[in-house]
Amino acid sequence: DAGVIQSPRHEVTEMGQEVTLRCKPISGHDYLFWYRQTMMRGLELLIYFNNNVPIDDSGMPEDRFSAKMPNASFSTLKIQPSEPRDSAVYFCASSSFRTLNEKLFFGSGTQLSVL
Amino acid sequence: SQQGEEDPQALSIQEGENATMNCSYKTSINNLQWYRQNSGRGLVHLILIRSNEREKHSGRLRVTLDTSKKSSSLLITASRAADTASYFCATDVDSGNTPLVFGKGTRLSVIA
């Protein structure tokens, strides 16, 4: 299996532009997570899905952030409009286990820079 | 909110030495996990220890868990330059089916 695949690997955009990050989880995994990593705040959980259904989006910082999972093999995280403080590395992770607290498989991340 | 907190924040050792990293957490847990992150890459799962376990081994890794002190340690024996990475602990909260919360990590540098 190719693992969790994220695209793009790097994204540079200007303030106010829309940004879409993409994730393909490992086939057969029921849970999908979006995390954001910064030096100041570490790794923060933004939202997670179970069987394509959003379960908890309390970590999404603002209404400018939205996430979807239209099918079991694809998820997007959208920021509209983007701001410089959104600059971070965004990770997608998936898990095959019935409970949330088991082993996670991470993608390589998207390095987002908002100028 | 931060559940786990690693100590030290950074550690530099010579190749062949042992590296010990610690993690403290605040609430009761079901399990604790350790992950490694190489520069510019995603996190990779290393080991999971459950709340009823006290010690676990995997190759050159040894993890201990002390639930009375709410702490865990990760020992890497005979370190190699390739072990240079950031190491994170992650915990759940023993109050139901909750997602993992990660600490800010320990940056380990192994000098050849």
Image: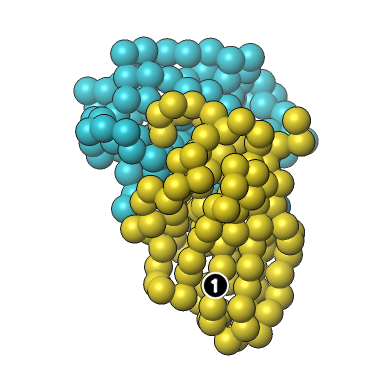
The colour chain A appears in is: yellow
Toward which corner of the image does residue A100 lie, by quadrant?
top left
Residue type at mark 1?
Ile
Q: Quadrant of the C terminus of chain B?
A: top right
Q: Which chain is cyan?
A: B
Image coords of residue B80 (percent x, y): 72, 29
**Residue found 54% across the figure and 78% down from its top:** A80
Residue A30 drawn at (x, y percent): 52, 35
Q: Is residue A77 above or below residue B48?
A: below
Dot 1: within a 10 Å radius of its alpha carbon, few (fewer than 14), some, or many (20 or more) residues?
many
Which residue in the protein does label 1 denote? A79
| Whole-percent x, y for residue B41 in the image | 69, 47
Q: Is residue B43 visible?
A: no
Residue at the (76%, 36%) spot, across then down: A2
Q: Is residue A105 above or below residue B69?
A: below
Work out whether residue A102 can be spotted. yes
Which residue occupies the foreground of this view, B65 or B99?
Answer: B99
**Residue B73 placement: quadrant:** top left
Residue at position x 43%, y 51% in the image? A54
- Residue B62: x and y in percent read 52, 18
